[in-house]
Image (cartoon, grey):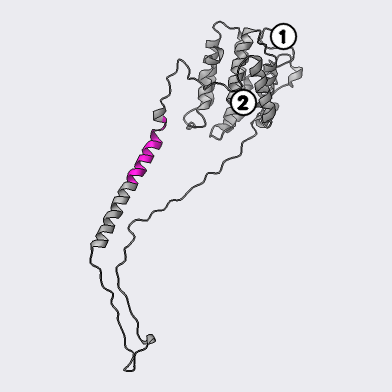
């Protein structure tokens, strides 16, 4: 299936929020490499126009996903989005929905493209509906009903030629941390128990009252002072825990950022560019066959 060819591209971006890459990992270059491999794999038995349209759908989703979360490579990705390759004056947030409205269930290649589009929508693509969840839901359901699918995709399967991720290793760190905390609490409880036993078993020092007569006159309450000496358990362990709250960062306006970034370096708007793949004339789509 065409959408399975782009499986590694989806996997790369879906892992980004849970395990942000370090400075040694260039996610942008890795994304380009996976897109090239997916394109070569998808060309086996398919027209180049169909593969190019599917790739652009995935690229638009990858751009939005990379800019929708906070990580160290976000600024560099914004400066060089994957959509820069198109050179058609169109933005993915507009082109994507123009393209899916023209897909027909009577064409086999369009059915495969609909699967790719539904996968992107299912994984959170919004485009120019970024702040309009109602309109986004209508577009999503309309596409799904046209091709007899559901608006909510099935769980994403791993790519067939990639090793399945071992979920155990993903949770080893938290498990070890929890185990260490439990052992530390047990050790602390045993220690406190032993200290309490030693304290209760030791002989108590009786209270001593020292009376200081001021004169030979009868003693009064103000003329005496009593000092009580009694053992008190000293604090052996001080426990303190400082809760550090993390303030959630506001969701960035990804569509607006891409629009502003691409507007300064692209030639003409979509309606005047006969070469862009989202034009109203299906025959003018680059490489697409109607």
Q: Quadrant of the N terminus?
A: top right
- Tell me where the magenta segment starts and ends, as one range: 170-184
* Main secondary-structure element of the magenta-colored stretch: helix
**Residue at image mark 2:** 125
Residue 248: give x, y in percent of width and height: 56, 41
| Tag of residue 68 | none
Mark 1 nearby-residue class (10 Å; few <14, some 14–19, many ≥20): some
Q: Which residue is mark 1?
A: 283
Asked which quadrant contains residue 181, the reply is top left
Q: Is residue 183 magenta?
A: yes
In the image, residue 243 above or below residue 63: below
| Residue 128 visible from this viewpoint | no
* Left or right side of 236 for 156: right
Q: Is residue 230 magenta?
A: no
Q: Secondary structure at mark 2?
A: loop
Q: Nearer the viewer, mark 2 or mark 1?
A: 2
Along the line of sight, which residue is nearer the eye, 258 or 191? 191
Q: Horizontal placement of 186 versus 74: left or right?
A: left
Relative to 140, does residue 51 appear above or below in the rendering?
A: above
| Residue 265 vertical placement versus 204 (above, below) | above
**Which residue appears farthest toward the right when viewing the image?**
272
Q: Looking at the image, which residue is at 26% across and 73% down?
A: 206
Q: How many marks?
A: 2
Q: Is 225 on the left or on the right of 69, as rendered?
A: left
The structure residue drawn at horizontal position 41% and vertical position 32%, both measured from the top left corner, is 171
Of 122 and 151, the residue lying toward us: 151
Q: CA distance from mark 2 to mark 1?
A: 26 Å
Residue furthest top as drawn: 45
Q: Which residue is situated farthest in the bottom direction here? A: 217
Where is residue 45? Give x, y as percent. 56, 5
Above or below, 135 against 208 in this view is above
């Amino acid at each position: 299936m065409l959408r399975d060819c782009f499986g590694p591209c989806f996997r790369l971006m879906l892992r980004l929020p849970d395990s942000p890459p370090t400075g040694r990992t260039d996610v942008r270059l890795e994304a380009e490499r996976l897109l090239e491999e997916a394109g070569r794999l998808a060309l086996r038995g398919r027209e180049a126009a169909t593969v190019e349209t599917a790739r652009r759908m995935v690229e638009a989703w990858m751009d939005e996903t990379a800019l929708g979360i906070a990580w160290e490579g976000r600024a560099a990705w914004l400066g060089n989005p994957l959509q820069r390759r198109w050179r058609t004056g169109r933005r993915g947030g507009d082109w994507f929905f123009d393209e899916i409205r023209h897909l027909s269930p009577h064409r086999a290649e369009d059915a495969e493209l609909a699967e790719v589009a539904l996968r992107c929508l299912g994984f959170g693509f919004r485009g120019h509906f970024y702040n309009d969840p109602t309109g986004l839901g209508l577009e999503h359901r309309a596409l799904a009903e046209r091709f007899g699918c559901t608006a909510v995709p099935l769980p994403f399967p791993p790519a067939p030629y990639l090793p399945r991720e071992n979920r155990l290793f993903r949770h080893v760190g938290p498990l070890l941390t929890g185990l260490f905390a439990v052992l530390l609490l047990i050790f602390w409880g045993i220690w406190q128990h032993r200290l309490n036993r030693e304290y209760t078993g030791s002989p108590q020092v009786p209270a001593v009252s020292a009376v200081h007569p001021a004169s030979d006159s009868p003693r009064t309450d103000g003329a005496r002072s009593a000092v009580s000496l009694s053992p008190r358990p000293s604090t052996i362990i001080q426990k303190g825990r400082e809760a550090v709250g993390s303030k959630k960062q506001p969701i960035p306006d990804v569509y607006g950022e891409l629009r502003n970034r691409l507007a300064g370096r692209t030639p003409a708007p979509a309606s005047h560019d006969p070469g862009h793949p989202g034009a109203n004339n299906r025959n003018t789509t680059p490489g697409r066959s109607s």
